[in-house]
Image (cartoon, rainbow, N blue to C red):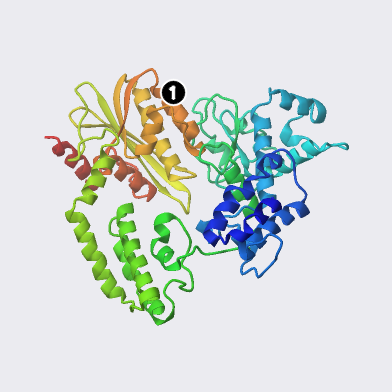
Amino acid sequence: MAAKMQGWKNHLLSHAGREVLIKAIVQAIPSYAMACFFFPQNFCQKMDAFIRNYWWKGDPGERGIHWEKWTSMCMSKHEGGMGFRNFSHFNQALLARQGWRLINSPNSSWARMFKGIYYPHSDFLQAARGARASWAWSSLLKGRELLLKGCRWQIHNGLSVRFWDDRRIPTLTNFKVSSLQPPGSGIVTVSDAIDPVTKLWKVAVLRTLVSGLETVPFIDKADTLVWHHTKSGTYSVKSGYHLSRKSSDKHLSRQPSSSFFFEVFGDKFGTCKSPSKSATFGGDPARMSWQQRQIWRNVVTGKETLSQSALIGWYIWKIRNDFIFNSVPVNPSDTLQKIHHGWNEYFLQGGEETIAALADNSMAVGSASGWTPPLVGTIKVNCDASFHRSSAKASAAAIMRDSEGHFIDRVVTSFFSASAPQAEAVAVRLACRLVQMYGLSLADIENDNQELIHLCVSETVPPWEIKVAVADIRSLARDRAWKLLWTRRTNNSAAHWVATADYRSSLPASWVTSVPLEFASVLSHDESAHL
């Protein structure tokens, strides 16, 4: 590796060129060996030193001045680093992938060989190192350390997962129940806490033992081990590398580059909190810009579209360059007027309407004018959920109406959820259960979450957090003439109102027999919309 970099030192490459060569060639050289064996720490540090010297000095053999810590340079660009690999963490992430394969392919020849030698009476996650462990086996155990940090159980029937000891709760940091098992509880495995009829938690039994139970359906299937840090639940080297790095670099905290841009758009792209200083403009204009940063936020929060954000970002970048290279003073108010002017020109060209049309035509939807009744002889059930991330509390509601728009029945429930998509999945499942309870063969089930409906009607593998719920929905609708449809939020106002009211605890106990005026107004509006 050092010899290859020696041949580049006289090419007078820019830092951008060095970055490409380092990432595309140098850091890829030891990948195959690292995927099989654990490299000593000193050796990994030596390889890191070669790259550091080449980056800062242009020669792997000369140290030069390092203007930033290497741990910071190895952070992703999103976090303010350069995205270089730390060989030690990358080595562990590659070995964890081999361990993941060992878990998921137990009948392969190499898996049977390791089991016969090192853990004939247990599994890979419980195996001991042994007195005469080979380099390959010791390397796999190093990868297992990372797997144990990011793996947890996905509960299906709960037979193989211990309720108090195993990692299974996605909303907790260590995935475990924080309390100890009380004497005489009678609950050993997760299946002991699941009602075999309803496939939900035995709430009456668990209410005195734990809090925050998620209302997620369970199915008669063996429990599976999932990787928590990917949506699919399958281990990836990328997610494993970031977990390994962050586990050892928790004290580091960096801000992305172009601080002003991320101050304006941070909450749109899920980035960081506001930086304390501006590295973009500098001097008095910088302080003036930061004092008026609320102006910029007001522009962004009008209509949250990627096209508008890109337009505003381009203007910010333009005035930044004018200030640095042409010494043009920065006036936030004037820039705000320029943004509005450019925005209006964009609308006159029909850019936004074109984007909206593409989004709406990506999937069949209901009428844009409001709720539409089903065909004669068919029942329609609208469902929705209300979820609050900080408390993890949610409510789901399903409203059943006939072809005349007349209200037939409803079901509503409150529960704890790990995420908004999971709460929406529970709402769709609730609607399916309501239709099943009535024994209906024809029904339209509508929800305003487009991605969820797509997952329910296709064979796409859903994210782990809604995988069980989607599987149950597919199973319920498979042999029936039910239609799972996506509709706009405006067409789903009845279910949305009930779910929101139940979440806020403002739904009267007798709201079905004595319909609240606001809910009656929503139903009346839906009935009159199709007349």
Task: Please tell me whether mark 1 sits on a helix, a strand or a loop.
Answer: helix
Please state which of residues 412 and 481 is positioned toward the viewer in this rendering: 481
In the rendered view, tell whether residue 68 sits above or below residue 48: below
- Residue 462: percent from left, percent from top: 46, 34
Amino acid type for the residue under numbered disc 1: Ser
Q: Residue furthest bottom?
A: 284
Q: Residue furthest left?
A: 531
Report if residue 250 is visible in the image.
no
In the rendered view, tell whether residue 280 sits above or below residue 355: below
Image quadrant assignment for residue 413: top left
Q: Name the residue under label 1.
A: 475
Q: Residue at coordinates 27% horizontally, 29% vertically from top-left?
A: 380
- Residue 406: percent from left, percent from top: 20, 32
Please state which of residues 143 and 481 is positioned toward the viewer in this rendering: 143
Q: Residue at coordinates 55% horizontally, 64% vertically from top-left?
A: 254
- Total labels: the figure holds 1
Report if residue 40 is visible in the image.
yes
- Residue 489: percent from left, percent from top: 28, 43
| Left or right: 369 in relation to 511 | left
Q: Which residue lies furthest to the right in this view?
A: 131
Image quadrant assignment for residue 146: top right
| Left or right: 501 in relation to 467 | left
In the rendered view, tell whether residue 301 sits above or below residue 325: above
The C terminus - image quarter:
top left
Please state which of residues 384 and 134 is positioned toward the viewer in this rendering: 134
Image quadrant assignment for residue 402: top left
